[in-house]
Image (cartoon, grey):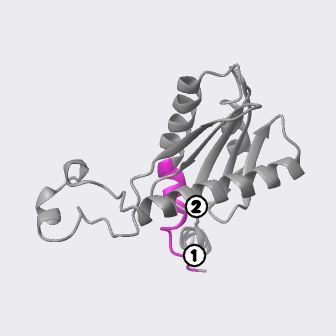
Amino acid sequence: TMILVFRRLEIEKCKMTMLCPTALKSLLNQANTGGVDSTLLISRDGSVMAHSGNTTERHALVTAAVASNVWGAYEKAGRSANLTMSPAKTANRRNYENGNAGGASENTSALKHIIMDCEEGRAGVALVPGTEYIVSIFANTTCEIGLLKKKLTTLVEYLEEPLGQLGQEPMNY
């Protein structure tokens, strides 16, 4: 029994949250209906974490780089224009009155998602709050903008908790 207890403690000590590629791909694939061609989960630096839909690996790498640059440019422009959280949208207005915008630093942007209507289709890009991950959805012109936005925001909401845990768990091994 001593070995069993030791192994249990050892397993609990080394337990980490990991991304399951097949589960992520399956989740992303659920959004690929109603005119949506492909869905990607990428890091802020443009690395592809998972992708699904009508896309090759090379196409996923290129679109991930573009999506990450678009997000970064809009977020930077928002911070430069001082488009951070307004006092009315903060949870605690008293903090704003004391010189702190609801705990948000001047680097925090109020930007939640970007929807683009392009010549050959539509794209949606959104940061998963509390993480360094971005969800990108690419659709053809038959996909309504409202549907694209709903799919994007639903994916972001669903991924927020599990992806938020990735950076919080200590690596004690």
**Residue type marked 2:** Gly
Instruction: Give whichever of 7, 44 is nearer the camera.
Output: 44
**Residue type marked 1:** Phe
Residue at the (20%, 54%) spot, across then down = 87
**Which circle's residue, 1 or 2, is located before the other in the chain?**
1
Mark 1 highlights which residue? 6
Q: In this view, does 95 lie above or below 63?
A: below
Residue at the (73%, 42%) spot, across then down = 25
Q: Position of residue 3 (x, y in %)?
A: 62, 74
Q: Distance between the Cα atoms at labels 1 and 2?
A: 47 Å
Is 6 a magenta residue?
no
**Which residues lie in the magenta part?**
160-172
Which quarter of the picture shows residue 144? top right
Q: Where is residue 22 in the image (x, y as percent from the top left)?
A: 75, 44
Can you see residue 43? Answer: yes
Which quarter of the picture shows residue 82? bottom left
Q: How many marks?
A: 2
* Residue 72 - label: 2
Q: Position of residue 126 (x, y in %)?
A: 55, 47
Q: What element carries label 1?
A: helix
The answer to whether residue 75 is left or right of residue 47 is: left
